[in-house]
Amino acid sequence: MAERAAATSPAQIRQGAFARAVAALTQGLVWLLLALIFSILMEWAGMLLRWPEQGVEHGRVLLAREVEGVVLAENLEALFRSVPPPLSLALDTTEKHERAERAAIMRERGCSELEAAYGVAERLAGATQ
């Protein structure tokens, strides 16, 4: 009886192709879940340590920049690029240096914040061409 138990120990049982595929899929899902958790923790750490004045707003800005796209074709087989148009970029600036640039334009031209955003958009459009 002891010989039979030793012959069927878990270390000696061979898995079939289906069991190996399920195990590989499960392991892949575990790694994806761990990567998601790590990404969320890094974003929280960034909000607390690197961007404390912006907090959650920084995450919203990044999400808007990554998700927003521009249609480049007229048919349904549209192409997307991940860079929003210059005016959108100029209006959603929240970094200190970006706000300082807009404030400098407002002082130089004596204009409103919206007009300064148009100035930043013109500079961005010129830089991308």
Image (cartoon, rainbow, N blue to C red):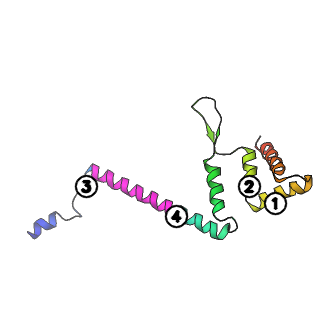
Q: Is residue 5 left or right of residue 88?
A: left
Along the line of sight, the residue nearer the viewer: 121 or 31: 121
Pointer 3 local density, CA inside 10 Å: few below 14, some 14–19, many at least 20: few
Circle 4: residue type: Phe
- Vertical side of 77 occupied by 126: above or below: below
Label 1 sits on a secondary structure element that is helix
Mark 3 vs mark 4: in front: 4
> In terms of sequence position, does the residue under pointer 3 or pointer 4 come before the other?
3
Distance between the Cα atoms at labels 4 and 1?
Answer: 33 Å
Residue that mark 1 sits on: 100
Kindly report which numbered mark, 2 or 3, lies closer to the viewer in this rendering.
2
Q: Residue at x 41, y 59 (%)?
A: 30
Residue marked by disc 2:
93
> Which quadrant would residue 62 be assigned to in this image?
bottom right
Asked whether 20 or 67 is in front, the reply is 67
> Looking at the image, which residue is at 60% across and 68% down?
45
Tell me the element at label 2: loop
Badge 3 element: loop
> At label 3, which amino acid type do we have?
Gln
For residue 32: magenta?
Answer: yes
Q: CA distance from mark 4 to mark 2?
A: 27 Å
The tag on residue 38 is 4
The residue that mark 3 highlights is 15
Query: Which three-letter amino acid code belongs to the residue tagged 1?
Result: Ala
Taking 39 as reference, is 50 left or right? right
Q: Secondary structure at mark 4?
A: helix
